[in-house]
Image (spheres, rainbow, N blue to C red):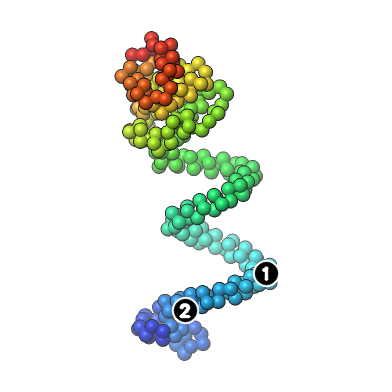
Amino acid sequence: MEKKCSKCNVVRDVREFNKAKESKDGLRGECKMCRKEINRIYKQANKERLSKYNLEYKNTNKERLSKYNFEYKNTNKESIAKQRKEYTEANREKLLIIYKDYREANNEKVLKATKKWRESNKDKASEYNNNYVKSRRKSDNLFRLKLSVRNAVVRYLVNGKSKGTPKILGLDYKEFQDYLEIEYIEGMHLDHIVPLSWANNDEEVYILNHYSNFQIITAEENLDKKDTYCKSENLKKVLDNHNNLTKLNQIIERNSDKIK
């Protein structure tokens, strides 16, 4: 069945019209598209009045609305979760921008709320964090690289890390990924060309965690090499790019018998 819209005069399927008990055919005179536009224009023209009315209505019916919302959420948990998931997937980029802007404007508030939630939900927070890290490690090579670098940097430090990892590296993580040239995929190992075990103190650990001293090798190569020696063929790249050759050469000269 079809019907002519009283607004746009287009003949449409009856399914394109909202129901209206008061009309003879049980349908509104204007189609859904026209009704939507009429509502939009009305809301725009009466923004202040509608806002005031809504606020008054909510304040007057606070208890009833709260009860209704509670019952509705409990009755429609699955459909609400599905709608949220679909909306989030369809608007991911938009939501990320909104969240980023909100966090920048309310950084202290967000940090305080996050800390409070984590303290009250330690088990949930731990489980969420573990699942998040596992999932992201599999799908995000740059994230996997970040974790590995952080672990590598703190491994031999006695007094803990005193500055951020990118500052120690001398590059941000994306620049470091580009420098390595080889994609850091699952199963590959991030290796120090000059072994970290050659460092005698925290200062030397920092020296050996400069970006120029890293390479990506296979698990088999790393198991064979361990931290017992350094290949002379790989040293040139380190020496060409390192920012503290004086200290680096002291470490190398002290372990010259372990260079192959």
At label 2, the amino acid type is: Ile
At label 1, the amino acid type is: Asn
Judging depth in this view, the residue of 56 and 118 nearest the camera is 56
Vertical order, 143 against 216 (above or below): below
Q: Which badge, 1 or 2, comes first in the chain's sequence?
A: 2
Location of the N terminus by quadrant is bottom left
Q: Residue furthest top?
A: 257
Residue 191 visible in the current orientation: no
Residue 238 visible in the current orientation: yes
Identity of the residue drawn at 46% across and 33% down: 166
Q: Position of residue 236 (x, y in %)?
A: 33, 21
Residue 196 quadrant: top left
Q: Residue furthest left?
A: 233
Q: Which residue is mark 1?
A: 59
Vertical order, 105 against 188 (above or below): below
Q: Helix or strand or loop: what does disc 1 sit on?
A: helix
Identity of the residue drawn at 41% across and 86% down: 6
Location of the C terminus by quadrant is top left
Q: Which residue is mark 2?
A: 38
Identity of the residue drawn at 40% across and 24% down: 242
Q: Helix or strand or loop: what does disc 2 sit on?
A: helix
Query: Residue 125 shows which numbered tag?
Result: none
The Cα atoms of the two marked residues, 1 and 2, are separated by 28 Å
Q: Residue furthest bottom?
A: 24
Q: Position of 115 compared to 260: left or right?
A: right
Q: Position of residue 195 (x, y in %)?
A: 42, 19
Dot 1, how many residues are within 10 Å of its Cα: few (below 14), some (14-19), or many (20+)?
few
Identity of the residue drawn at 52% across and 61% down: 80
